[in-house]
Amino acid sequence: MARVFLVGAGPGDPDLLTMKAHRLLTQADVVLHDSLVDRRIIAMIRAGATIIDVGKRCGRHAATQSQISALLCRHASQPGIVLRLKGGDPMVFGRATEEMAALEAAGIAYEIIPGITAATAAAAALKISLTRRGAARAVHFLTGHGADGGLPAHDWVALTQAGGTLAVYMGGQTAGGTAAHLIEAGMAPNTPTIAIENASLPGESIRHGSIAALPRMLAEMNPAGPVLVLIGEALRPTDAAAQLRRAVKPASGLLAARRVAR
């Protein structure tokens, strides 16, 4: 039986791969990958390996989920290393549950290799923490894209009352509905909101605004890549943060000058 791995490829930047994911890419015999996996990561796959694009993106499906699960089990029945390579983290909106169930039903052992998910990659790019004392003590991951292509039926009132930061994955096409539902549920229209396309990639695009302005922000962005929407008070700039940044920069410069002098 094969050794099977469900591997997170991270948000796109190859440098953000885990060491284990990189090692497996150089050892794999078969790789089934999503469309959103960066081509530079695909190029790391061992020469001679069988590479299969099973991606689903913007309504264009290379394979259905049942077909992907069947392919995974079929290749796993042969000797070698089989990788199911997913963008981000396989356990965050990665449809891993269906694939794990198929493997378990076939009696095939597997291992999960986590990857950096889009929300933390976006926070790093923005240099903004998703949590902040007194402003956000929780982070809520939700999808903006349902099985029918529309906005899922979230409990908008509960999300609004819970506080914390909302990270809306695949939120570009349904941004207008997301904004309308949250405001109707009681969210302040001026709640800070950031839309980020292609987090961690060279074509990264960022728009800052409010939840009320989210539809306009997305219209201006006109995204072609995946969009993550962050919403919440933790994203609001603070005077204390600005003062800290101003204080740190001169100190860092002075320290560098002292090192050079030595």
Image: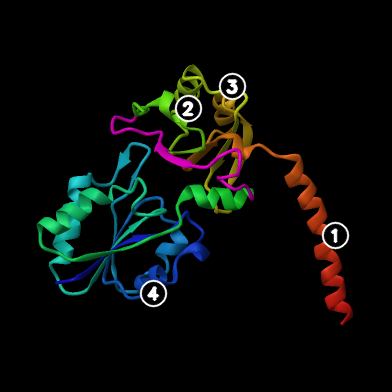
Residue density around tag 4, few if under 14, some if 14–19, many if 20 or more, within 10 Å: some
- Residue annotated with mark 4: 23
Q: Is residue 142 magenta?
A: yes
Q: Classify mark 2: helix, strand or loop.
A: helix
The residue at 60%/44% (across/down) is 133
Q: CA distance from mark 1 to mark 2?
A: 41 Å
Which of marks 1 and 3 precedes in the sequence? Answer: 3
Q: Give how far apart the Cα atoms at labels 4 and 3 are.
A: 47 Å
Q: Secondary structure at mark 3?
A: loop
Left or right for 156, reference 3:
right
Question: Which of pointers 2 and 4 lies earlier in the amino acid sequence?
Answer: 4
**Alpha carbon separation for disc pair 3 and 1:** 37 Å
Is 197 on the left or on the right of 27, as rendered? right
Residue at the spot of label 2 = 161
First along the sequence among labels 1 and 4: 4
| Predominant SS along the magenta part | loop
Q: On the rendered image, what quadrant is the N terminus found in?
A: bottom left
